[in-house]
Image (tube, rainbow, N blue to C red):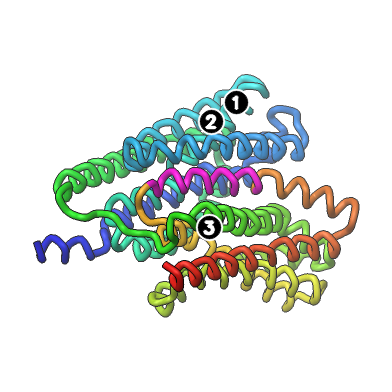
Amino acid sequence: MLKVNALSERMPVAAVVALGVTQIIGYGTLYYSFSILAPDMAAHFSWSSEWIFGALSVALLIGGLSAPWLGALFDRIGAGRVMTVGSAAAAAALVVCALAPGKATFVAALIAIEVAANLVQYGAAFALLVQLRPQVAQRSITYLTLIAGFASTIFWPITAALHAYLSWQHVYLVFAALNLLVCLPLHAWLSHGAARRKTASSALPTRTEGILTSDLRFIGFTLMVAGFSLQSLVSSAVLVHMVPLLSGLGLGTSAALVGTLFGPSQVLSRLINMTFGQNLQPLRLALIAAALLPAGVVVLVLTAPSVPGAMLFAVIFGMGNGLLSIVTGTLPLTLFGSDGYGKLQGKMMSARLIVSAIAPFVLALSMQRLGFIWSLSITAALGALAVLAFRAIDGLVRNGTRFG
């Protein structure tokens, strides 16, 4: 018994590394590549770039609406099986998108890509780590986000290099092959391992309890979803418009250089947390992440058009976004436990994806009507509300501990 318990406390390193590979490919092929290929997609279908990104927003919105149902599947049949099917679905959707004869088929395939993305990206991967070893899932999620943080750094140049020799259609066919030949076998292996572990440990306690009492769970979940949704609003709105936003604030050609600091800053924050923050509670980490995002925007507003100020913004904002990826996996586990974790992730993903789909359009409209400074100021204020949401959860935890 002691030997089994000791094993259960070890992080599943092979699973984390395998998921790191599939997350890099999943985010790289299904998300980060789009902005590089979009101009040629627009030219191919005789659309403006606004219409192409509008189609992406519709796809993200529908993908968000499907997330609660998909999240329930993680619990019902296992996240590993869902991810295996998701890899096949992602490959098929990329192929259909590449071969689309017209706009309607292209948009339908784009929707299928975003739905498939929900089956293979962070929400599913976090659920799988919880199902594999719930006792060490928080540490596993931290390491996974560190590896997957290199997705944009790896796939932006890969996509650009492939696109220099291949059409966007052929690039998508290459990416379909990656999902089919690399991600699917790894997900199938992880699914088999999860099923085998479930059988072997059926007589052992393989669950973790949440710290919120049952009477506080509804309000706690509502506050958590509100906090994460507000952070997603700030993150997605600013990231989509980052380079044109910085240019519009007067940074000119320096805008693209400043934007390159974002990715490394995400990884840096995860590395710092992994090295020095092992004893930091997820709720405290959520508060730090919630504070960093609006703080970065405020720095940009106060210092524009200063290049050093914009660089400081990119670092602070990138670090906040990097920590956000961690706490979206660890905080639900801490507050509510491992039971029904996949369903919780699905509901949370739905709210975040819907907000992420709408936020860039709203910010673009706001910048046209109110200007850059006022739009960013309002964005920062909305982001600051996330801090209040997590502070309220902290109050619930303290009260529950005091009177429980």
The quadrant of the rendering that contains the C terminus is bottom left
**Residue receiving disc 3:** 220
Q: Does 22 appear above or below 8?
A: above
- Coordinates of residue 276 in the picture (x, y in percent): 42, 80
Tell which circle, 3 or 1, labels the residue nearer the N-terminal end: 1
**Residue receiving disc 2:** 112
Question: Which residue is located at x 30 percent, y 44 percent?
Answer: 186
Nearer mark to the viewer, of 3 and 2: 3
What range of the chain is rendered magenta? Answer: 340-355
Q: Secondary structure at mark 2?
A: helix
**Residue receiving disc 1:** 108
- Coordinates of residue 191 in the picture (x, y in percent): 27, 42
Left or right of 218, for residue 75: left
Disc 1 from disc 2: Cα separation: 6 Å
- Coordinates of residue 288 in the picture (x, y in percent): 57, 72
Asked if the residues shown at circle 1 and circle 2 are in contact, with their CB atoms under 8 angstroms apart, the answer is yes
Left or right of 203, for residue 341: right
